[in-house]
Image (cartoon, helix red, strand yellow):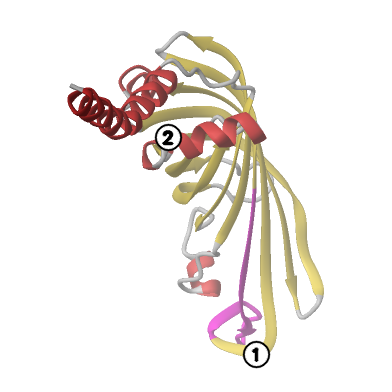
Amino acid sequence: MRHLVLSLLIASFLVALVAAPERAEAQYSDEFDGYYPSREIFSAGIGLGMYVPNVGNDSFREVFGKDRGPYLTGDLDFRILRLKDFGVLTLGVHMGWARYGADACGIDETGAADCSNTVEEETVLRIFPLSALAGLTFDMLARKWRVPFYVTGRVGLDSVFYSAKTGGIRDAAGASLGLRWEAELALELDFLDRRAQRSLDDEWGINHSYLFAKIFGSTASTLLAVGTKIAWVAGLGLVF
């Protein structure tokens, strides 16, 4: 009888050891499923893309050839109003920078620029877009069903500061105004490791991280046509 009782105790102990990790995992899973991220205040992103100013004729291509930048960007969007699980309204700013360089065009017999014959001096054009944008992010798939995609549309005022120099001598400088639009698709990275994402939220206040790709255009042309018909940027963003 004593051997039977002892055997039952040992068997019960072994079963408890085997079941303990499963119970712990289930408990963690239940705890995670009840987790809600901290309040979303703003998002910030950095990106890299291509931008060709739309000057209205072939002069940019004649001078700079196929130079497209690259175009470096930074974005900051404040989340003004959450529309439940449907989406969120934002107000933000976009900043960009690009540099284009080529050998300066020569001068023909009539005194006109002849870009088929270049000189040793370099012509450099720099642009600094600074935009104020209102946006709407549709994130229902990610928030409600954990499908890690969302779409954002933005529109607003675009101010493109520019500076052109040839051989160290400034040819032109100023800022052109226009309308800017953006269409962005984002892949939320939370699904790669949701526990790690929760830790980032708890310790650093990073609600979500995402990769994005967007196309945009600008009509900035009041002083000099330095907007663009269509350009693109891809990068990394964080929601705090």
Task: Calculate the distance from the C-alpha at mark 2 to the C-alpha at mark 1.
Answer: 58 Å
Pick the residue in front: 88 or 195: 195
Quadrant for the N terminus in the image: top left
Identify the amino acid type marked 2: Arg
Residue 24 in the image, given as x and y percentages of width and height: 38, 27
Q: In the figure, 149 relative to 162: above or below?
A: above
Indicate which label's residue lies in the foreground, 2 or 1: 2
Disc 2 and disc 1 in contact, CB within 8 angstroms: no
Numbered-mark total: 2
Quadrant for the C terminus in the image: top right
* Secondary structure of residue under mark 1: strand
Could you tell whether 30 is left or right of 134 in the image? left
Q: Residue 71 occupies which quadrant of the picture?
A: bottom right
Of helix, strand and loop, which mostly describes the magenta segment?
A: strand
Report crowding for label 2: few under 14, some 14 to 19, many 20 or more residues within 10 A (C-alpha).
Answer: few
Q: In the figure, 59 relative to 223: above or below?
A: below
Pick the residue in front: 137 or 95: 137
Residue 186 in the image, given as x and y percentages of width and height: 41, 38
Residue 132 in the image, given as x and y percentages of width and height: 65, 31
Residue under numbered circle 2:
194
Looking at the image, which residue is at 32% across and 22% down? 141
Looking at the image, which residue is at 61% across and 77% down? 113
Pick the residue in front: 185 or 227: 185
Looking at the image, which residue is at 65% across and 34% down? 203
Looking at the image, which residue is at 60% across and 86% down? 108
Disc on the earlier residue, 2 or 1: 1
Q: Which residues are magenta?
A: 96-116
Q: Can I make out residue 151 in this image?
A: yes
Residue under numbered circle 1:
119
Q: Is residue 152 magenta?
A: no
Report crowding for label 1: few under 14, some 14 to 19, many 20 or more residues within 10 A (C-alpha).
Answer: few
As drawn, the residue found furthest toward the right would be 169
